[in-house]
Amino acid sequence: MRSPWLAALTLALSGLAVAPAAHAQLAVSVNDNKLMLVNGVTRVIANAPADTVTLIDLSANPAKVVAEIAAPGSVVGPPFSVAITPDESLALVTAAQKIDPADPTKQTADNRMSVIDLKASPPAVIATLETGKAPAGLSINRQGTLALVANREEGTVSVFTIQGKTVTPAGKVTIADAKSGVSHATIAPDGKLALVSRDGDDRISVLSIDGTKVEYTRRDLNAGLRPYGIDIASNGAFAAAANIGRGQGDNDTISLIDMKANPPRVVETVTVGQTPEGIKVSPDSTLIAVVVMNGSNKPKESPFFSDHGKLVLLRVNGTAMTKVGEAPIGHWSQGVTFSADSRTILIGNMVERDVWVFEWTGSTLRDTGQRIKVNGGSAALRTADK
């Protein structure tokens, strides 16, 4: 049963706005209120308020917050802990970690996924489902009928079916042991294949999908050190994986996967900087946006510290990647997503507790100066894959 204070908070936050406009393009930010960064060290916040989910209308100029509700989330795992159905009717939000009931100064694995009705007035959590241990990155197929959730501390992927506003568990796929660090599952546009990153043992696993039947093909790709965030282009031609490395100050990489090859394979890897946390392919399949921590999460006395992260844009041409833009961002930055026209780029910052708005003109990356405040550290950021 929900506690009275959480119920009150949910009501207060949801009262910020009525349901989003029917033709709005929504971005969703999952905001973690449990952790803060103190000179390179993450600490659990005492008596932390509830985590929140913020809905941002990208069709407005400038973009604006249209609703905010309470729902559990986590910065632990790739910043893909939210997925939106193609018709923008539902959002699914996973929570990899929660405050340890036995020791409130620590976190422990959670196993919850919230189902949020985005069309309700106001938007609201309509169901809470059980996943595997420490659910992290998830995706919904472009048919809007299936969701896959990577369980970081279990070595599995949970399968859910979607029918209208009903989300139903449909089993699990075992990929490896718990130490494999299954991180994120991304689904090909035709809905017949998925790629699953494994940062614990440096692999990307290929799953086959036939309706609700999801199987591990036993084929793994080898991209780089600790593949974490991963995304497949909407045209199905390629995927991009962010390899976060060992966090020891070395420059880390992005790998390009040729999805037209049979079987798919890694074809190029480029260096982008320390710890590429977030990654997203633009809707027009021409760009890869990468959020690079750039040492902004390290102690100030560290030789690898930088007082800002960076957004890096890579242009994809066939099986090659070329850097076409770079801009400073906040600290301990996480997710990145595009507007439908591939011109607006959003960046979520944990330390600043906000979302920054950038513009891509086709040749120039520009910081618009807009900062969208959210209630918590922006731990994941997503728009619908269509």
Image (cartoon, helix red, strand yellow):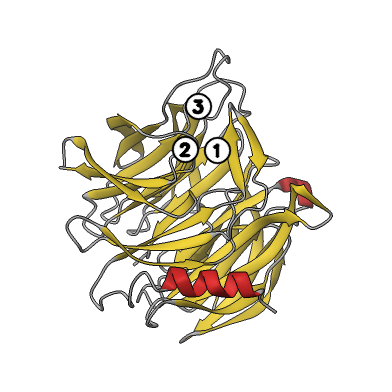
Image point 62% across, 53% down: which residue? 48
Query: Cα distance, mark 1 to mark 3?
Result: 16 Å
* Image-based side of 63 in relation to 82, left or right: left
Depicted 173 relative to depicted 76: above or below:
below
Q: Position of residue 154 (x, y in %)?
A: 75, 57
Q: Residues within 10 Å of mark 2 (few under 14, many from 20)?
A: many
Depicted 241 relative to depicted 16: above or below:
above
- Res. 367 image quadrant: top left
- Asked which secondary structure carries label 2, the reply is strand
Mark 3 residue type: Gln
Query: Viewer-proximal residue, 234 or 293?
Result: 293
Q: Position of residue 55 (x, y in %)?
A: 37, 64
Mark 1 residue type: Ala
Q: Nearer the viewer, mark 1 or mark 3?
A: 3
Image point 19% across, 55% down: which residue? 62
Pointer 1 residue: 223
- Asked which secondary structure carries label 1, the reply is loop
* Image-based side of 252 in relation to 339, left or right: right
Point out the tag, 1 or 3, that comes first from the N-terminus: 1
Pointer 2 residue: 255
Depicted 384 relative to depicted 145: above or below:
above
